[in-house]
Image: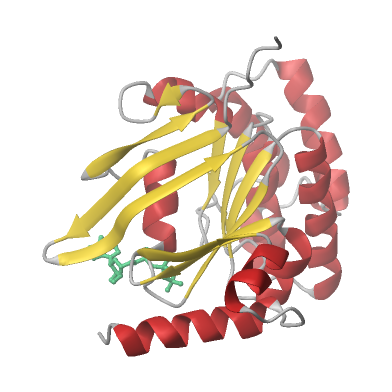
Amino acid sequence: MAPTALPALEIKSLTKRFGSKTAVADFHLTLPPGAFYGLLGANGAGKTTTMRMIAGLLQADQGSICVYGHRVETDPKAVKAITAWLPDEPLLYDKLTPMEYLEFIAGLWAVEASVAEKRAEELLRWMDLWDERDKRCETFSRGMKQKTALAGALLHDPKLLLLDEPFSGLDAAVARQVKELLVEKTKEGCTIVLTTHVMEIAERLTERVGIFHRGHLLADGSLEELRAKTGRPAANLEDIFIQLVDEASVSSPA
Ligand code: ATP
């Protein structure tokens, strides 16, 4: 019998409270390698808190998170080596050029110089930043900075990519490029978890979504599964999202 592949991400009973407020309540998720998962929810639903816990930047109150079998709580170095986290407002060192920034990131991740150089060129070309590679990031537009940060996140070839609102600030053409790049990455086996408020993006890009509401997972599945769950075979993701969140708000008002 073939050995069972380790899940790329396995989250059990994840819970986080801030004072009396429960930001994430008993969240479970298992994703195989190459999955593309969307975390959806209104402002304050708990998406970023969840992502930060997966990235090891925030300690959970309860539960466990494993990335390819490495526990975030007890083996954070092993997890960080194969994970990349792109926050919604990434921090770039403005005085560096994209090339210098990528060299710096390569150093942090101990990526061998010749490999880093090749990957940096591929990524900057893909992002249409090759001609800007020697200009300081302080002169860049928001979208250019976002693309530089994404190149930095991809430089060490992560197996798990956590993207918080990666398309905000990107124009349509750039957004399309980035979407293509992300789909390509999943085909190579990289698992992606992204948050977005744009339902069309989630519907077109991800194969499965989780809908959060006030820290609780209301529903999880593919669009087809969510259509079946809500009994609306022709509904789009936005219709389903609004229905589920409205129902939850009525049954448990804030
Ligand atoms: P958005 O779509 O607005 O980014 P979100 O779904 O990412 O929202 P979170 O940032 O995870 O939401 O926040 C979930 C809840 O936890 C919110 O009520 C928020 O106020 C609270 N929260 C998040 N971080 C902290 C913190 N450091 N201290 C106190 N409360 C926090």
Residue that extends furthest to the left in the rendered view of this protein: 20
Residue at point 62%, 41% (across, down): 153
The quadrant of the image that shows the N terminus is top right
Residue 183: image x %, image y %?
80, 49
Relative depth, front residue between 92 and 188: 188
Residue at point 27%, 87% (across, down): 253
The quadrant of the image that shows the C terminus is bottom left
Q: Give the answer, above or below, for where 94 lies relative to 70.
A: below
- Indicate left or right for 175 with 36 as reference: right
- Indicate left or right for 242 with 1 as reference: left
- The answer to whether one can see residue 168 in this image is no
Residue 52: image x %, image y %?
40, 49
Residue 67: image x %, image y %?
50, 30
Residue 58: image x %, image y %?
31, 45
Residue at point 35%, 90% (across, down): 250
- Indicate left or right for 39 with 47 as reference: right
Q: Give the answer, above or below, for where 81 lies relative to 31.
A: above
Relative depth, front residue between 58 and 4: 4
- Within the image, what quadrant is residue 39 found in? bottom right
Residue that extends furthest to the top in the rendered view of this protein: 1
Q: Give the answer, above or below, for where 169 lies relative to 94.
A: below
Residue at point 78%, 46% (across, down): 133
Q: Give the answer, above or below, for where 187 lies relative to 136.
A: above
Which of the four quarters of the rendered structure image does ligand 1 lie in? bottom left
- Indicate left or right for 101 with 117 as reference: left
- The answer to whether one can see residue 105 in this image is yes
Relative depth, front residue between 146 and 42: 42
